[in-house]
Amino acid sequence: MIMMIDQPWVEKYRPQSSKDLVGNTTAISKIKKWLSNWPKSISRNKRALMLFGPSGVGKTLVAHTIGSELGYDITEINATVKRSKKSMDELLQTSTMTGTLTSTRGRVLLVDELAGLSGKSDRGAASALKEHIQKTRVPIILVTNDISEPKIRPLRKITTLIEFEPVKESEIVEMLKQICNQEKIRFEDSALDTLASHSRGDIRAAINDLQSISKSVSVLNNRNLLEFIQSRDQRIDLNEALDRIFYAETWNKAIIAANQIDVYPDELIRWINANIPLVFPELKQQIKAFDFLSRASIFSRRINRTQNWRLLPYSKELMCITGTITDGTPTPKRSEYRFPDWIQQMGFSRGVRQKRVLVGHALSPIVHLSAKRAYEEYITVLKALLKEAKLKERVKNDLDLSEDLVHFILK
């Protein structure tokens, strides 16, 4: 039997037109006017918009909704993925200079998660983006939560800034009422007020919370809402999370446990994978559990490849393998779970990579190459020099190599 997974309500009730959008009416009006009048709307040669404001207030959603409504084809780039100048250039080259055959107005380039460019691994993507904005033939919309990041500041000078604010509680309550009526959820008005207040203007969080709690209550009231919020916000350690997932009385309780742990979804999948044979003794239980986990892994890989985080609820629900799902009784609870082999291997390889970097940095100023190329091209020579007893101490001192690094090079 394949268990059907509920569609995330943030997708199910996704606005179909600008009339369905909630909150930030001033910002929505400015974006609509700017896109409607492109390219005449360009002000002081600012060929891009920068939408900024808190997470969950609808910045990306508004850009997609208005762009589609006006007949544009939306090409989205996630800045947390394309962070090198080369990869960003390759995407921008065609996206900013050509139109599209599938829309009436052409293309809008949407660059989401702009703050991701400020990380340590950024190697010129921000400068590539700046160059293409200045010569683009299509509208560009940048989206970020924080415009104070140093690498974003140069982009502010060549874009029109539009600020998004937290959605008003009264507007969130009206949206939640509509969803409750559509889903036939019985509720007390005060509970929706509390839910809206707790969301702090994040309409996406409010809808996700409503969907989660609706699975386990018959009538939504303040008492069961506050119990849900308290249990969801409480962080738990890995062992306790695995206990709650494997031995949950209901599937929904297992999902809550998966949301209470601070590990990446991929890592949680590997922990569950390593411990299924220990928890479920019967072969038929293991087969069913691994079937669910393989489906979770498919969604997880798709998220990594496309950065479509809207798929995360599907992956998390599938990885929550309880005794009720496997139609059997798990073994007694364990005091300690088995460590995934993959994580141990990654820990070892991380140490190897760090040592290669240190050796590369020692060689780099002498051979006038990057640390990576210095290591790749000269590690054989360095190893040969260190094997010579007469040269070993001199080379070691000249490069300031520790005994640990010398041992690493020679082994």
Image: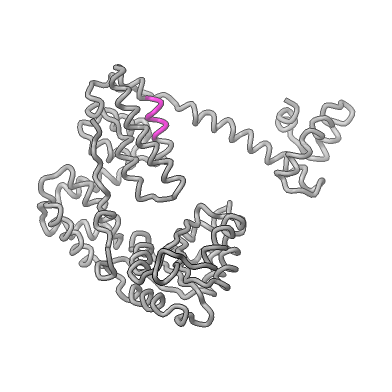
What residue is shown at x 68% (from left), y 41% (from top)?
357
In reply to whether residue 374 is colored magenta, the answer given is no
* Residue 346 appears left or right of 213: right
Report the predominant secondary structure element of the magenta stretch: helix
Q: Is residue 296 above or below residue 159?
A: above
What residue is shown at x 31% (from left), y 17% (from top)?
283
Most distant residue in the top direction: 282
* Residue 91 appears left or right of 3: right
- Say which quarter of the image contains residue 218: top left
What residue is shown at x 52% (from left), y 72% (from top)?
137
Can residue 307 be spotted in the picture? Answer: yes
Return the x and y of residue 244 as percentages of the image width and height. 28, 32
Specify the quadrant that holds the C terminus. Answer: top right
Most distant residue in the right direction: 390
Q: Is residue 18 above or below residue 311?
A: below
Specify the quadrant that holds the N terminus. Answer: top left
The segment highlighted magenta reads 269-275
* Residue 253 appears left or right of 108: left
